[in-house]
Image: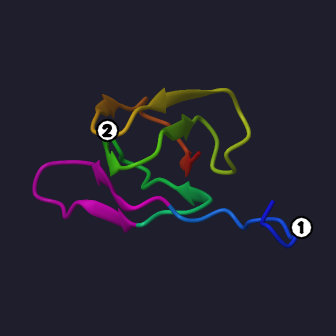
Amino acid sequence: MSVLGAPIPAHAATGQVVVFSTEFTPLSIYNDPEGCHKLPLASTQLNNQTDRPVRVYLDPFCLTPSITVQPGHGSRVPPVTGSFSVD
């Protein structure tokens, strides 16, 4: 809460989430991500270049149990991974 008693809104993470799918395809880059993002179908690796943890989910709606990728780290993602969100 702020000094005036109003809730402080959540802010987007600073930095990028970079997703690799396959050779010879462009990287998917999410600048200053906020909220839930559906991953490209062929995603194989996610790199967290933000200042906050990123959660990777098996469904496209950020609802199932997740793994957490800390800032400055990357992770392979399961073949049918559906989405990610920023804490």
Q: Is residue 5 above or below residue 81?
A: below
Q: Which residues are magenta?
A: 13-31
What's the residue at 36%, 45% (across, down)? 43
Residue 78's quadrant in the figure?
top left
**Residue shown at the point (64%, 41%) measured from the top left:** 59
Find disc 1 in the rendering and name its residue. Answer: 5
* In this view, 73 is above or below 34: above
Amino acid of disc 2: Thr
Q: In the image, is 24 to the left or to the right of 51?
A: left
Residue 45 picture quarter: top left
Decide: is 75 above or below 31.
above
Instruction: Give the distance between the C-alpha atoms of the residues marked 2 and 1, in whole angstroms.
Output: 44 Å
Label 2: which secondary element: loop
Tell me the crowding category of disc 2: few under 14, some 14 to 19, or many 20 or more residues within 10 angstroms, Cα based.
some
| x 29%, y 33%: residue | 73
Q: Which residue is mark 2?
A: 44
The residue at the far right in this view is 5
- Kind of residue sitting beneath label 1: Gly
